Amino acid sequence: MAFLDIPSFTMVTNYPNYEDPYRYRRFHAGVQQFSPKSAEIREHHFWGGFEGSFEPHNVVANDPKVETTAGGGVQASYYYIANHVKTTFHWEFTPPAQPRYRANWTTTIEVENRTKRDLPGYLQFFACYHKAAENYYWDASGEILPCADGGFTATRDATSNDKLRRSPYHTHMNRYRDKHTISYQTYRYPVLLSRKEDCFSGLRHVTMSAPATCAGVVTWNSQARDYMIQPPSGNLKSGESFRARIRHVIAPAETAQDLERLWREFETGVLRT
């Protein structure tokens, strides 16, 4: 059985009811298929002076493509333009890189500023929805800890948390503060983990974001493993672009040593290529 069911790819060009263009992907996890919404769903972007809403979520997806690659892999891509900022998505699905994996794929996101003006403190937010269940992050202490319920954000350090609290991102989060606790923590590396799931053959969905372009990892009401990306400098100047990379792995991850191994593979197999 192939690890990807190619005919199951369904392409659409808009976003009714939170539908991601690739939501209907079905991955073979070695034992069974699963159809997660753990693929990135575009939602918001923010910068100094712009509070944002769902502009990236609501614009049309352009030039959708799906193609097979040498070695039995699949690539998928599309782009959208919101507020004169172009974002290009590229997914690469490859056979499991290690025998202990059930599936893995890499997301590459390129963002280009076409506004003819600088965008200070630029952030773009992506959601990876799932059925409500506890999520975990790799805390700065080195431990794997549960993410707090409500609006949970973790960044690289206290300075980054303070910056977010003074940004339009926090203004957006505060819209929900009457019903949900908004909290901030710091991570060792930008990693989120699901609980062990039957649909993942008893394994976990692990996301790892490139540190230089990660503005934070986020969970929301225990039903999303999200992340934000930013330019390495923190500001997106007119005409400039940046690239972020995120790795998804369905794998065993019970200890900090397991995460160290996954992170080393992410660094050597994705970030250095």
Image: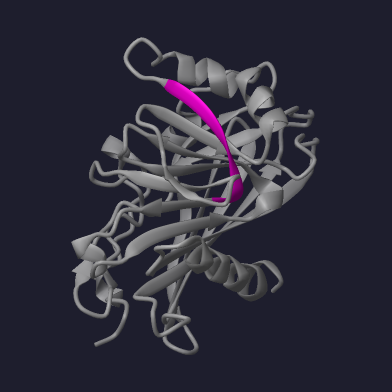
Number of dots carrying numbers? 0
Magenta residues, as a range? 182-190
Q: Residue at x 62, y 34 (%)?
A: 123
| Foreground of the two, 143 or 167 | 143
In this rendering, does residue 91 appear at all? no
Looking at the picture, does residue 169 appear above or below residue 73? above
- The quarter of the picture where the C terminus appears is bottom right
Instruction: Answer left or right for 19 relative to 49.
Output: left
Q: Quadrant of the N terminus?
A: bottom left
Q: Which coloring applies here? A: one colour
Q: Residue furthest top?
A: 178
* Residue at position x 51%, y 43% in the image: 227
The image position of residue 51, as x and y in percent, is: 57, 18
Q: Can residue 176 be seen in this snapshot?
A: yes
**Position of residue 74 measured from the top left corner of the image (x, y, whole percent):** 43, 76
Foreground: 216 or 135? 135
Q: Is residue 110 part of the magenta span, yes or no?
A: no
> Residue 237: image x %, image y %?
80, 36
